[in-house]
Amino acid sequence: TLAPARHSVIAIKEVQATTQNIVQTNEVLLKGIYLKQVANVAYTRIYMGRETISTPLGQFPACRFVTTTQTKSESRDRPNPDSDTRTTAWVAAEGPYRGLRLKEEAIIRRYGNADNTESTDTVVTEIKQVTLFDLK
């Protein structure tokens, strides 16, 4: 559950930021063991402007958004580490795929593990093919 529900403001001006703080609660039953994980999550989303990008699907005018997420565990047993994530996303600005997330790059840093280790992952996704996209 997310309290309050996460919102995603789309109609914002260039370099305008939107922010939201959420308490995220995950309840999991795993092999007969109940786990409840609570974290404070701070989102910031900035519309950076329009640019043309190339993907395997083609070349498109796109809106670029940068989102930062800071997650701090509130669980006593801290089953999940804290994390900071910076995601850059390009969303088709016009044409038949308007509104489709064409490309995304995320850098995720996890820290605060029980053993005080830190790790960083980079995840990149791109759209290669669209079978059905019917945004109304």
Image (cartoon, helix red, strand yellow):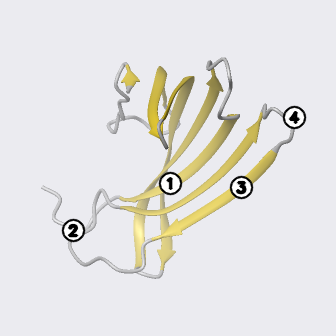
Q: Which mark is residue 121?
A: 3
Q: At label 2, which amino acid type do we have?
A: Phe
Which badge, 4 or 1, is on the more N-terminal residue? 1
Residue beneath disc 1: 89
In the drawing, does residue 118 fall left or right of residue 47?
right
Q: Residues within 10 Å of mark 1 (few under 14, many from 20)?
A: many
Q: Which residue is mark 2?
A: 133
Taking the view exactly as shown, the residue that stands out farthest to the right is: 116
Indicate the position of residue 54 as horizontal and vertical percent values.
50, 76
Q: Earlier in the sequence, mark 4 or mark 3?
A: 4
Question: Looking at numbered disc 4 in the image, what kind of residue is underneath it?
Answer: Asn
In the rendering, at what x and y percent does residue 100 appear?
33, 61
Nearer mark to the viewer, of 3 and 1: 3
Q: Residue furthest left?
A: 136
Residue 2 on image: x %, y % = 39, 25
Residue 66 position by quadrant: top right
| Image mark for residue 116 | 4
Mark closer to the chain start, 3 or 1: 1
Disc with the residue nearer the chain's start (2 vs 3): 3
Inter-mark Cα distance, 4 to 2: 44 Å
Horizontal and vertical percent position of residue 25: 46, 25
Task: Say which amino acid is labelled 3.
Answer: Asp
Spatial separation of the CA atoms under disc 4 and disc 1: 31 Å
Contact between labelled residues 1 and 3, with CB atoms less than 8 Å apart: no
What secondary structure is marked by label 4? loop
Identity, as a three-letter code, of the amino acid under mark 1: Ala
CA–CA distance between discs 2 and 3?
30 Å
